[in-house]
Image (cartoon, rainbow, N blue to C red):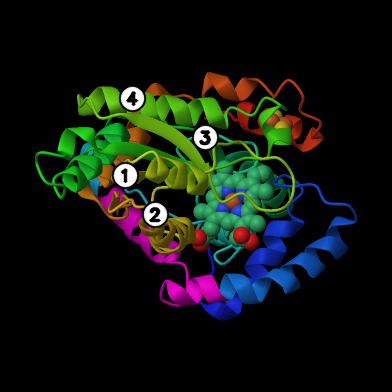
Amino acid sequence: MGGPATLDKVHDFLHNLFSDSDLMRLPIQPLAAKFIARRRTPQIQDQYNQIGGGSPILHWTEKQGEMMEKILDQISPETAPHKHYVAFRYVDPLTADTVKQMKEDGIKRAVVFTQYPQYSCSTTGSSLNELYRCLKKSDPENDIKWSVIDRWNTHPGFVKAISQKIKAKLQEYPSAERDHVVLLFSAHSLPMSIVNRGDPYPAEVAATVDHVIRHLKVRNPHRLVWQSQVGPSAWLGPQTGDAIKKYGEMGKKNLLLVPIAFTSDHIETLFELDIEYGKEAHESGVTGYKRSESLNDDPTFVQAMADIVKGHLDAGQITSPLMALRCPACNNDKCAEQKEFFASQKL
Ligand SMILES: C=CC1=C(C)c2cc3[nH]c(cc4nc(cc5[nH]c(cc1n2)c(C)c5CCC(=O)O)C(CCC(=O)O)=C4C)c(C)c3C=C
Ligand code: FES
Ligand SMILES: [Fe+2]
């Protein structure tokens, strides 16, 4: 997805986001996107201002890529050297520019590695549709051969990395209270229209939570809640903010928030969870409100990234079997074209 590294990039980020018909359909979308982006820019700029003046996602993604390629060169010497490229959906480095750069660099074999652990047609799906469009323009002869890591929501390394972050944060609670801390797993919500289309994301997020809980081997009570809904339509709930408030009212003093659907820090962790909900939590009597750290450049996580790529290369798979199936209520022809394109790659 990417995020604006500086405040002056917020407008274009929002404009590109609201223009994306794979993420949301708006009436007279080009006009609506212009209008909403302009109206929303000051509020979102203020949020980025409060987290240090921009999104750290490019910094973390570059760092993860550099660390991962070094590990890959060691564990998969037969496919070395490995080189990472970053393709963001809404802000520099945009997918179109990255594809052009790869062509210039003479790349012949590439792995699309989505950085969303769980698959949603609104996120990974949108990015794959965009990549497919860019390739049609910049690599019509299909010079670069592609395979796709389209989801990795239950990969043991990823599960282990998240679990370690939770364990570390649990240690910060007094030992007598530690076993009763409520683990609130929080993921970005989805509009119900997308959930009901049959989007795989809610079930895949729940599967991650289940694997983490099993891996942790703790008896803490836990719940999966959903954050960051925008606009007036119905979104998948319960909302994270409401859950924090209600648990506070129920007398739960210790809540540990666990971001579960995004691997580096962003506005939803640094602003929404830490600043916005942190304040509300204290007002609701949640005195032990904490958040487990994002994975960022965590060595266990970066090792997992390398293992995921190696596993993918070793298996010789083009896409996962799940990619063969569209949502039962998909009405987006672009999904079909994109899926056919990637499935037809010959390595
Ligand atoms: C797994 C992660 C995400 C899913 C699923 C997702 C779906 C989704 N998002 C919107 C609308 C907006 N998202 C916005 C920002 C944003 N979204 C995610 C992640 C997911 N979105 C992140 C990490 C970010 C922030 C990037 C950062 O740098 O921090 C925004 C812009 C902010 C705002 O205006 O409030 C919108 C809008 C929809 C409609 C949707 C599913 C259809
Ligand atoms: S919307 Fe899910 S496959 Fe098209
Ligand atoms: Fe979003």
- Give the mark nearer the N terminus: 2 vs 3: 3
- Where is residue 232 shown, x and y percent of the image? 74, 50
| Residue holding disc 3 | 148
- Residue 281's disc is 2
Q: Amino acid at mark 2?
A: Ala
Q: Badge 1 is on which residue?
A: 255
Q: Secondary structure at mark 1?
A: strand
The disc label shown at residue 279, or none: none
Helix, strand or loop under label 3: strand
Identity of the residue drawn at 41% across and 44% down? 249
**Are the two marked residues, 1 and 2, in contact with CB atoms closer than 8 angstroms?**
yes
Q: Which residue is mark 4?
A: 211
Give the spatial CA distance, label 1 vs label 3.
Answer: 37 Å
Q: Which residues are magenta?
A: 46-70
Identify the mark nearer the N-term, 1 or 3: 3
Asked whether the residues under the numbered discs 4 and 1 touch, taking CB atoms below 8 Å apart as contact, a structural biologist would say no
> How far, Cα to Cα, is label 4 from label 2?
27 Å
Q: CA distance from mark 4 to mark 3?
A: 23 Å
For the residues bearing labels 1 and 3, Cβ distance under 8 angstroms? no
Q: Is mark 1 within 8 Å of ligand 1?
A: no
Q: Position of residue 42 (x, y in %)?
A: 64, 77
* Image point (36%, 54%), residue name: 65
Q: Is residue 140 left or right of residue 56?
A: right
Amino acid type, label 4: His
The tag earlier along the polypeptide, 4 or 3, is 3
